[in-house]
Image: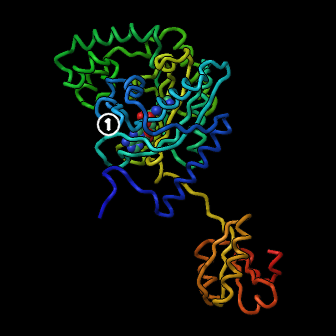
Amino acid sequence: MIRSLRGMNDTLEPEESQRFSYFIETASRIARNYGFRFIETPQLEETALFKRAVGESSDIVGKEMYQFIDKGENSVCLRPEGTAGVVRAFIQNKYDRQEQTQRFFYHGTMFRYERPQKGRLRQFHQFGCESFGEVSVLEDLSMILMVRNIFDALGIAFTLKLNSLGDQNCMPSYREKLVGFLDAHEAQLCEDCQRRKTTNPIRVLDCKNAACQALYATAPKLMQNLCRSCESDFNTLTAHLDVQGVAYEIDTHLVRGLDYYSKTAFEFVSTEIGAQSSIAGGGRYDRLVEFLDGRPTPAVGFAIGIERLMELIKMPELEREGYYFGALDEHAISKLYILGMNKRRSAKVMIEYNARNLKAHLKAADKANARFCAILGENELSSGTIWLKDLVEKTESEIAQEAL
Ligand code: HAM
């Protein structure tokens, strides 16, 4: 038997697939309320896109990409995340030349060759939003509030972690300070951090090694070294979060696993799903459009990891919906089928192709969660009617077939 690849799952169990669709519907509706419109970009892109956007020093690019040479000798890669492709599309379609703010949402599969475990897959789904053209920190705020809205609508509890990663004014001098600190403690650094010190020193801050973490507790903090504009934006953001009643933790070691961020960085974490607890992440990336050869355009976005939410989503009570059509005799099936297909133009209809007795049909209609059970037998055939039971009101009636 051929099985799916490790870390790549099917979604087909009724309850799971209902949750999945319900999540997409809910999140899309809320994103539209915030002025976002749907964008679809390819799953396969040039490898260079992710190398440049996500960064060569990141684990995603360094270790986790599904990268190969295609038949035309191009180096291509299954997307490990959604932002790079949306930025590429934004530039390629010349949206970077427009004045207006452009807001997009997407959902789809992402691929990272990670070690699979609970909540960590090699093919997983993200729902993401990207906003281009807004310098105001209120857009960062709106993004965070949108994620809050989505999680509230689904009954999901979360903790919000916040940090500022500074900008080109304050980050370089902070980086120097940090490297000075790392140089002074070189002997105590793990191997990975010794490497990070030269490739991307900020990355040391979220090292998983306990000894490193103990050391970095005393390292200089970017939060205390922000320039005036970054500090003021961060204060505006937190003040508004207070007004909105959103609790947050400032986490000065939150650096995110992708290199494109500046200023606001955030992560939503759940305490109910084990080690892979990050359920959404995002932040500002004001330099990325320019970095991918577009006109300088400020931008901010986030992505939610759908698989990690699945067991947290609280589904609303399912209401009975639509019709179940059943025949009592073989020769009523053809007419039943025609009536059912007509009704299908305007309502959800299930048609049973096999003749059964009334009791069996009612049971099947109940199981299918239909609102109405419509039955056609000898009597109805000759009188041009159909028997109808409302499974909510518990009423029965015989109505003309045209009245259906
Ligand atoms: P990210 O933090 O790498 O950010 O991923 C976002 C979310 O995707 C994570 O919080 C997690 O829920 C989910 N996720 C990541 N890797 C896996 C995996 N292997 N298995 C299951 N779920 C996973 C980004 O991807 C950025 N593009 C977000 C963004 C958009 N920033 C700005 N705009």
Horizontal placement of 33 versus 57: left or right?
A: right
Question: Does mark 1's beta carbon lie closer than 8 Å to ligand 1?
Answer: no
**Residue 310 visible in the shown view:** yes
Report the colour scheme. Answer: rainbow
Residue occupying the point 54% across, 33% down: 247
In this view, the residue in front, 317 or 356, is 356
Q: Where residue 266 sits in the image (x, y, percent)?
A: 48, 29
Q: Position of residue 199 (x, y in %)?
A: 29, 18
The residue at 47%/20% (across/down) is: 292
**Nearer the observer, 403 or 219:** 403
Q: Which residue is mark 1?
A: 68
Q: From the image, which quarter does the C terminus lie in?
A: bottom right
Q: Residue at x 46, y 26 (%)?
A: 250
Tell me residue 387's x, y (percent): 75, 84
> Observer-nearest residue: 216 or 167?
167
Element on which disc 1 rests: strand
Residue 278 is at least partly visible in this image: no
For image coordinates 53% across by 18% down, the residue present is 294
Under mark 1, the amino acid is Phe
Residue furthest out toward the left? 187
Side of 191 relative to 315 (left or right): left
Other residues around mark 1 within 10 Å, as few (<14) / some (14–19) / many (≥20):
some
Position of residue 43 measured from the top left corner of the image (x, y, whole percent): 45, 39
Q: Identify whether 154 is placed above or below 83.
A: below
Residue 241 falls in which quadrant of the image? Answer: top right
Judged left or right of residue 132, residue 114 is left
